[in-house]
Amino acid sequence: MAKAAAKSANLPDNFEQGLAELETLIAQMEAGGQALDASLLAFSRGTELLRFCESKLSAAEQQVRLLEGGELKPMPKMGTE
């Protein structure tokens, strides 16, 4: 249980923070120049952040479904009414 609590303590407070950190990690990894150990740590953290963001999006989608009466409706296209 202590391990799960330690992991959740490292998670961002919200989706936006998680996404921002994930984008920063991706940019650093794409730039290269990191040592192998640092790259592996970044990859591991990125995976954790990806799961966190996906779970937040899934929860938001479920809330939208509830608000829409169980049916997820497509978003209107930009520039059309």
Image (cartoon, helix red, strand yellow):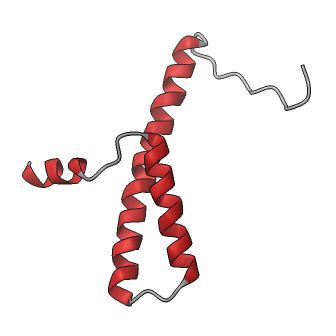
Q: Is 14 left, or right, of 10 in this rendering?
A: right
Q: Residue at x 41, y 62 (%)?
A: 47
Residue 48 to residue 77: above or below: below
Q: Residue at x 57, y 78 (%)?
A: 30
Residue 67 to residue 5: above or below: above
Q: Residue at x 56, y 19 (%)?
A: 65
Tell me residue 20's x, y (percent). 50, 53
Residue 62 to residue 18: above or below: above
Direction left: furthest residue: 2
Q: Quadrant of residue 44?
A: bottom left
Q: Quadrant of the C terminus?
A: top right
Q: Quadrant of residue 70?
A: top right
Tell me residue 35's x, y (percent). 39, 89
Direction right: furthest residue: 80
Tell me residue 29's x, y (percent). 51, 77
Q: Nearer the viewer, residue 76 or 29?
A: 29
Tell me residue 80's x, y (percent). 91, 25
Q: Is 30 left, or right, of 51 in this rendering?
A: right
> Looking at the image, how many numbered discs can be counted on the residues?
0
Q: Is 70 left, or right, of 34 in this rendering?
A: right
Q: Residue at x 31, y 49 (%)?
A: 11
